[in-house]
Image (spheres, coloured by chain):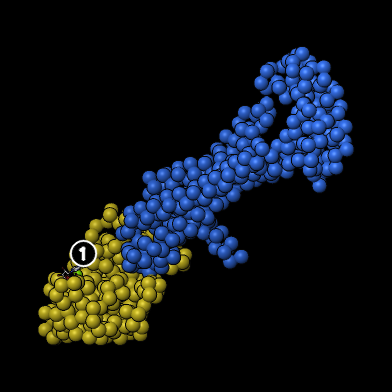
Amino acid sequence: MIELDNVAYSYGGAELFSALNLSLAPGSFHFLTGPSGAGKTTLLKLCYGELTATAGQVRLFGADARAMDRNAVAHIRRRIGVVHQDCQFLDHLSVAENIALPLTVSGRTAQPTDVTDLLGWVGLTRQAAQTPPELSGGERQRAALARAVIMSPDVILADEPTGNVDAEMSQRLMALLLELNKMGKTILIATHDLSLIRTAKAQVSARVLRLKDRKLQLAGADL
Amino acid sequence: MDMMRRWLDLLAGDPQADRAVPPTGFTARLTVLSAFAMAFLAVFALALSLATGRLADRWSSELAKTSTLRISAPVGQVDAQRDAALAVLQTTPGVASARALTDDEQRALLAPWFGPDLPIETLPVPQLIEIIEDDAGFDVAGLRARLQAEVPGAVLDDHTRWRAPLVEAASRLRLLGIVSMILIAGATAAMITLAANAALAANAQVIRVMRLVGAQDIYIARAFIRRFTLRALTGAAAGTLAGTLAILLLPRTDVAGGFLTGLGFQGWHWLWPLIIPILAAVVAFAATRHAALRTLKEQS
Ligand SMILES: Nc1ncnc2c1ncn2[C@@H]1O[C@H](COP(=O)(O)OP(=O)(O)OP(=O)(O)O)[C@@H](O)[C@H]1O
Ligand SMILES: [Mg+2]
């Protein structure tokens, strides 16, 4: 689905990471950990075409990301659901409209039931008509997850999806992601939350990757 | 056909896309206002072109076929010289008809300057003879020579002396009207481009989010295009209506020969102003599309 081949990235200055290899097979479940500032968010951005690798090759659904024009990137993004670390909502639209936005911009009409089901699924039925700034941090993250899955994407990339929620809610969100994985979705989650990783490992064969000192390594069984 | 459908699609709109890009009230009002002003001006430029076009046509075609003979003679000799002149004219090849103006007609000609009831009989007013040429026309120099010999008080005026510069001026005015309309269209395009760029810059974050969820450039651009096209159309329609009303309400007097008051539309020419809002919409469509696609390309 997503393959990184010998990839390096730098924001102009020193390289954030280099010679990085990663392959997300269909239906696989990955965690991405590492210290703050290691480049987890940056790595995810490479995976949905927001950034272009400074070296190496990124292949999205088999196509070279570097060779894609903006329209191709737009189409790729409809197949990759992303939960952004900073959510990225349109603050003047309601939560329900924000969740339906990927459908809207791809020219499809959102089925009201789809949006209602999703809102119930992430526990935001009551907040449907509110705007994102009126939500709590955790509610926003749940709304972001709902928006990420509304297109029924093949791949879901989640950047700290449980950063702002309590343990119970993070377990619930994890359960949602596990459910999606059982439906065959490929999942990559960047997180610091070790308990989250443990919960998941108890249920699926998740691989844990660690981004540290400019390298991506498979974490040991000590987790 | 395809073009037509795309246009209708665009104007019918996609309410959800329109909601995704929040309207900027200030830019919107300025755009409508500018479109109004430009359309108002365009109506006058259009009226000027059409009216001067009519004048030029009339002066060059109708007046070209007529000449005037003026006879100045001592009061007692006027009638004799008039008859002599008419006799000469009747035997001149190329003259279709020649007719002496009556006292009443001469009085009417002088009325704008001297007022009504001028005692024209007692004044040394020259006698005028109106000559209408046939298609072949007559030999002006030859006629002048014959008249000089037979009617010493006669002066032939074939109108070219004052007609040519008038036709020239009318044509030039018409050109100025057309140039004005082109300039107005250009200014409208420039203003719409500036407004669209301001709206695009103000919505940079919105555009970013729409892109993150898979929006294509053309989808984002369309939200702006639709908005600015409709604004320009609305403003221009109102401006055209106001301009047309202003022309309709111009005082209508025929005393001054209808030169100034001829600034207006005649017959089916009243349909011409209808193209102004359409043109404004087309200009807005093209300008916004260009601005949006260029900005979106730069922002990525
Ligand atoms: N747009 C940018 N321009 C320049 N430097 C940037 C930019 N974005 C991120 N960085 C730098 O790149 C490094 C990695 O950032 P990134 O957001 O990928 O880290 P992260 O691993 O996601 O951290 P966190 O766990 O805190 O979310 C940081 O040092 C950051 O300062
Ligand atoms: Mg991060």
Relative to residue B78, is residue B295 depicted above or below? below
Horizontal arrangement in the rendering, residue A64 relative to residue B84 (left or right): left
**At x 60% / y 35%, what residue is drawn?**
B247
Relative to residue A13, is residue A28 depicted above or below? below
Which quadrant holds the N terminus of chain B? bottom right
Report the chain shown in yellow: A
Relative to residue A181, is residue B182 depicted above or below? above
Quarter location, residue B124: top right
**Closest to the observer, A73 or B253:** B253
Would residue B125 be seen by someone viewing this image from the given angle?
yes
Horizontal arrangement in the rendering, residue B73 relative to residue A141 (left or right): right
Q: Residues within 10 Å of mark 1 (few under 14, many from 20)?
A: some
- Identify the subunit bearing mark 1: A
Report the chain shown in blue: B
Q: Residue furthest front?
A: B149
**At x 72% / y 24%, what residue is drawn?**
B109
Q: Which amino acid type corresponds to the residue marked 1 in the rendered image?
A: Val
- Name the residue tied to disc 1: A165
Which quadrant holds the C terminus of chain B? bottom left
